[in-house]
Image (cartoon, coloured by chain):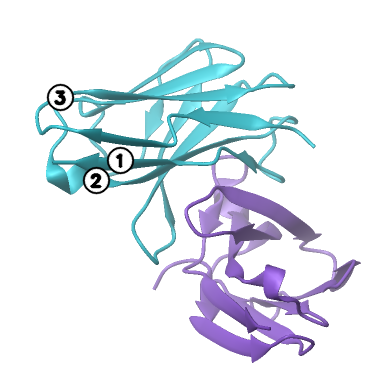
Chain colours: A cyan, B purple
Amino acid sequence: GAVVSQHPSWVICKSGTSVKIECRSLDFQATTMFWYRQFPKQSLMLMATSNEGSKATYEQGVEKDKFLINHASLTLSTLTVTSAHPEDSSFYICSASPTGLYEKLFFGSGTQLSVL
Amino acid sequence: SQQGEEDPQALSIQEGENATMNCSYKTSINNLQWYRQNSGRGLVHLILIRSNEREKHSGRLRVTLDTSKKSSSLLITASRAADTASYFCATDARETSGSRLTFGEGTQLTVNP
């Protein structure tokens, strides 16, 4: 099956610093990727839809200046958490679909962010 | 309430038993999908059932869909300890077709050896 690679798997940073998370589709092109946030024992909350070559579409309540998304190529999307604070600590997951449809998403392995 | 509510929230069974998880949703859908998540990992797609389908099988998995009741169930037969994970349903809502999948709250399944 299709593979989505996400790095890093975990990151610890100091409050006020920025953290970049990468999401790559290894064996298919993804015009659209999705970024989710997940708190312990909770569901996935869609943060934004990343579109190659255009601006990301953010969900209501998600600060676009806080969570910068760049989808510069058909295989790479990045999420940068700017000026991170402890409340940004969470599990971030990306996903993409080889077909461009929303029928069978392939997920990265997730990034656990801990902000001290 | 959120689209894609699941019950039970947690389920603990013995190896060899069957596990049934349910998902309810509110709006019309194009399809409903089930995903599995091991602790601290990404999700893995298990099965998709379209709105015009009533039942689907894949190995030890059986999914049903009742659009009149806006509900779906996932049955795992002859469970194994390796099936221990969280299971999420996800709906592709007709009103927002092509825009997103909405995930349910998930069921934490524990299969005891």
Measure the C-alpha gap from mark 1 to mark 3: 12 Å
Instruction: Work out which residue is located at the far front of the displayed protein and give it.
Output: B113
In the displayed structure, would residue B108 be above or below residue B99?
below
Measure the C-alpha gap from mark 3 to mark 2: 13 Å
Which residue is under mark 3?
Answer: A17
The answer to whether any part of residue B8 appears in the image is no
Identified by mark 2, the residue type is Ser
Label at residue A89: 2
Which residue is under mark 1?
Answer: A113
Relative to residue A98, is residue B23 drawn left or right? Answer: left
**Mark 2 falls on what kind of element?**
loop
Which image quadrant is residue A92 in? top left
Residue A105 lies, in percent from the top left, at 66, 42
Residue A42 lies, in percent from the top left, at 39, 64
Label at residue A71: none
Answer with mark 2 or mark 1, whichever residue precedes in sequence. 2
